[in-house]
Structures are given as C-alpha cells and as structure tokens.
Amino acid sequence: MVVIGIVAILVGMMMPALAGSISQSRLTRDMSLLRSHAATIAIYCNDRDGFFPLAHDDPWIAAQTWAEPLLDGGYFGTKHETDPDVLRRGKHPSIAMSMCMVYDAALMRPGHTVPVEQQRTTPVRDTQVLFPSLKGLVFKVHNGSPIPGEGGSQFCCFELWRFPAAMSDGSSTAGTYLDFHSGLPPYVENEIGMPVYSTWYGVRGMDR
C-alpha cells in the first residue's frame, strides 16, 4: 500500500509537467503547419497577380473557407492537409485566414465600420499589407475544446488560450487574444477590431 501511495504521488506530480509538454508539442506542430500554409498562400498569390484566395462574398465565410480556392487549384491535395486534427474528427475547420485579406481596409477603421450583414468581400493583394512581419495571415480560431455559450468563439475574450498565428511574411508566433492587443483593452465595432482576425485598419494594420 505504501508503494502504491508513493507511485500515485509521483504520478500526480508528473501530470502537470506532462500536460505542459504535450501542449507545447501541439503548439510547435501547429506553428509549423501555419508557416507552411502561409508559404502556400504566398505561392497562390504569386500565381494570381497577388490576390489572396477568395471563396465567398461574405468576408467572415471567406476567411473560414480560405483553403477552397487552393484545393481547387491543386495547391493542396486533400482537405486533411489544411486542418488535419479537426477535419479528421468531423468538426468545423479550426484554422482561418484573416478577413483583412478579403475586406476593404477603409471599412476597418474605428467609426467607419458597417454592420456585419452589410459587409462584403473585396479582392485584396499581398502588396497592400503594409507591415508583413506584424500582420497575422492565418491562425487557430479554437483549440478543439467545447466552445462555451451559443455561437461563441474561443478566439475571443472569455478563454484566453495561447493560440498560434503565421504572419504575412511567413514567420509564426503565439499568444493570447490580449497579447496581440499589446495588453490594451480590446475594442470591437461591428466585429471589426479582433486581432489577427479583423485587425483595425485591415491589411494596413498591425497585430504585434
């Protein structure tokens, strides 16, 4: 009994470290995948006169379905390559492209936004990104855990998990929602103003 008790204590002490190691391993894997996606998007843009992939006239849906034009063009072989974990489990894709890449930057300024139902996509070129190393391109919207509430997104606000993002220059980083706000309180207007996803000033803005 004493031996079993000691083993139980040791296992209990090891679990947090093991969980942290697994979490870091997943984060490293996701950052590598996102860098690869950023490179593939860059190739696509180069072949399409600089335009980012655009699959829908709603910018939010276009951000979620960013991989469809790349699949149609043969840049990916299967959907599994774009988001292996989530798609294998039959869930919605967890990787999104920033809607800044498919929406008018002039409508992404405080006081100049329009209601979500009026927002429509605008073709955007990669050369319009003013700060490539500072503007997020693709990122993990959620980590696969159940999303609290109705219609919520783990990306914003109520669960500050550390998510990975690939920047427009192909580099990658990770941080919480507030980290990408540089510690400032978030301000969202008509869903515009979420870091990486709907960054203020769009492709002219910065996420870090």
Image (cartoon, rainbow, N blue to C red):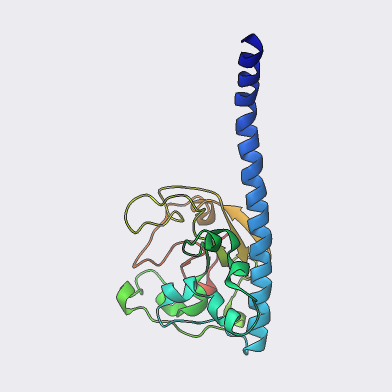
Judging depth in this view, the residue of 71 and 202 nearest the camera is 71
Q: Residue shown at 59%/75% (left/top)?
A: 130
The tally of labels here is: 0
User: Residue 17, located in which quarter of the rendered image?
Assistant: top right
Judging depth in this view, the residue of 71 and 98 nearest the camera is 71
Screen quadrant of the C terminus: bottom right
Residue 99 in view here: no
Q: Is residue 72 left or right of residue 115?
A: right
Residue 66 x %, y %: 53, 75
Residue found at the far top of this picture: 2
Q: Residue shown at 62%/82% (left/top)?
A: 127
Residue 126 x %, y %: 60, 80
Q: Is residue 56 above or below residue 16?
A: below
Residue 28 x %, y %: 67, 53
Q: Is residue 80 above or below residue 15?
A: below
Q: Residue shown at 65%/66% (left/top)?
A: 133
Screen quadrant of the N terminus: top right
Residue 131 x %, y %: 61, 71
Residue found at the far front of this picture: 1
Q: Is residue 130 left or right of residue 57?
A: right
Judging depth in this view, the residue of 190 and 12 nearest the camera is 12
Q: Residue shown at 44%/81% (left/top)?
A: 56
Judging depth in this view, the residue of 143 and 124 nearest the camera is 143
User: Residue 21, located in which quarter of the rendered image?
Assistant: top right
User: Residue 3, located in which quarter of the rendered image?
Assistant: top right
